[in-house]
Image (tube, rainbow, N blue to C red):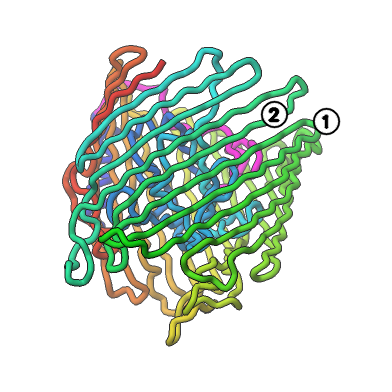
Amino acid sequence: MQTILYRSLLLASTPFTVLAATSDEAVNLAETVVTATRTETRQNELATAMTVYTRHDIEKLQVRTLPELLKGTPGVDMVQSGGYGKDTNVYLRGTNADHVLVLIDGIKAGSVTTGTSAFQFIPIDQIERVEIIRGPQSSLYGSEAIGGVIQIFTRKGGTSERPNIALEAGGGSYETYNGSAAINGKWGKAWYSLSAAQFGSQGINALSGVSVANGFNPDRDGYNNTSVNAKTGYRFDNGAELEAFFLRAEGETEIDNSISSSTEFINQTLGATASANFSDMWKSTLRVGQSMDDADQFRHNGQFTSRFNTTRWNASWLNELALHKDHQLTVGADYRFDEVDSSTRYVETSRYDVGVFTDLHSRIFDRHFLNASLRWDENQAFGDSVTGNFGWRFNWDYGLSAFASFGNAFKAPTFNQLYFPGFGNAGLKPEKSTSFEAGFAGHHDWGNWELRAYHTNIEDLIVFSGTPSTAKNIGKAQIDGIEAEVSTPIFGWNNKLSMNLMTPKDRQTNLRLPRRVTESLSYDVSRSFGDLDIGASVLAQGERFDNISNTVRLGSFMTADLRTAYRIDKNWMLSAKLNNMFDKRYQTVNTYNSFGRNFYFSIHYNY
């Protein structure tokens, strides 16, 4: 791995030493975020670690899926069981895959049975913005946010009376194809957005080293996804606003195992938001919604094998109180009702969770910023839980900042862990964590940098042990890590370099937690030459172990991607991307393949 990191750093240093010119297109963070405090807050007033991707970033990077966008993000490690549409697990700062809370337009998404979200099915064409918040966030959101929160905002309405139209069509290796159409605009005091897309691929053989005799099918495993997104809203004369939104993705993904051959899926989120200013000091927002995660599995001969359909009903009430120009208080309440409809008979098929919280954001002595939050949750399955978080940031001269934060979090047991026949345990307690982090950052004329160190302890981890295997709260984990980022325009090239160093270990065995890497480096460089844009990305990761006993080792790897785009005129653009240009063969899950060298070409129209 040292060799890979050295080569990556050498490649990263090239634009700093041999390229000339200047650029004012530095890789700057967005000014405000919503997810970190549940209200719009300036990033430079928060201690929270965060990464934001806008629609511009998605189009510039030419990513075809959400996992492709998240790959290489600071603090994010991702493993995939094959190509497009295959199981994807995201680990935030080394925590478990079900320690990540996923929101879509403020609505909790994900499977109630597994506790994870199907990142592979969320259509990238329908996404306007992604906010990734690293570190414990249960004091604002309740269960699951031990590692952090990923919030996805779908396409928004336009600001012009003239409709904005965007069309795209493309294709590439593995018989991959994509087509999308979007329109947005406003009409008087109303705004609207409507988009549809279809993505598909014949894919690769997801699973290697298995035989037909054992029930596996060593052929290419295809994937198709058809999605639609709609959003509309209206602003009244008194400033009150109403908005409704809808996102649906459905399709089929082929899989390789001894039980089933394909999964037909539906992922859907819908909801409505109403907000009003009752006074100069008080803004109130009510949001209701529903998210669905449906999956039906079939054998190679088309015979139905299983159904796991889960639904989450969400409601939240948020009140923003301006106590003073330097002190803002947020008070709110959440209600969620989870349901399971499955071919597997669970002892319980529903449960509720209610939570109330408060968050105080203050400015002290002009340059100090404090953020404190506290929350109480009552869960039908295990009882109540109290979580809190405190953050401090100091911005001083020369563009330098220091920050520190401390918080605890919890994750409620999933329906599988509680009630699945044979290994569920209805007496499980929630998993709990405590985390501390500190760091420094700089914002200068030449660019931005940030350095963070964090420490997380997790107690009562749910593991499966005994004969027969039963879920138990006996696991303990400790995760220590360092995150570093620097972005700068040098000689006309925009450069961004990120590094993650981490030691995720089981505190009882002192072994590394499975499927986590301890070393990761990502680098992106881009530049515009008039109507021509070019860019490249490099990702280098160390080895990982695929099992808890650390006996199955997966090797380190480095991949490099190239991309280019040419604007024919103000309406038309051509783009092309070469992924894994050195055709590196690697695995992030044992026996599951990843894409080799592949390309994608597309044409875009905007009006």
**Residue found 49% across the figure and 34% down from its top:** 229
Name the main secondary structure of what is drawn in magenta: loop
Q: Residue at x 47, y 54 (%)?
A: 294
Residue farthest to the right? 279
- x then y, percent, for residue 341: 53, 61
Residue 97: give x, y in percent of width and height.
45, 60
* Mark 1, other Cα within 10 Å: few <14 / some 14–19 / many ≥20: few
Vertical comparison of 223 with 24: above or below = below
Q: Which residues are magenta?
A: 19-48
Q: Amino acid at mark 2?
A: Glu
196 relative to 234 in the view: left or right: left
Separation of marks 2 and 1 at Cα, in angstroms: 15 Å
Residue at the far bottom: name it: 467
Query: On the rendered image, what quadrant is the C terminus found in?
Result: top left
Residue at numbered disc 1: 279
Res 241 label = 2
Return the x and y of residue 55 as percentages of the image width and height: 44, 31
Residue 295, above or below 571: below
Contact (Cβ within 8 Å) of mark 2 with mark 1: no
Q: Residues within 10 Å of mark 2 (few under 14, many from 20)?
A: some
Q: Which of 243/250 is in front? A: 250
Label 1: element kind: strand
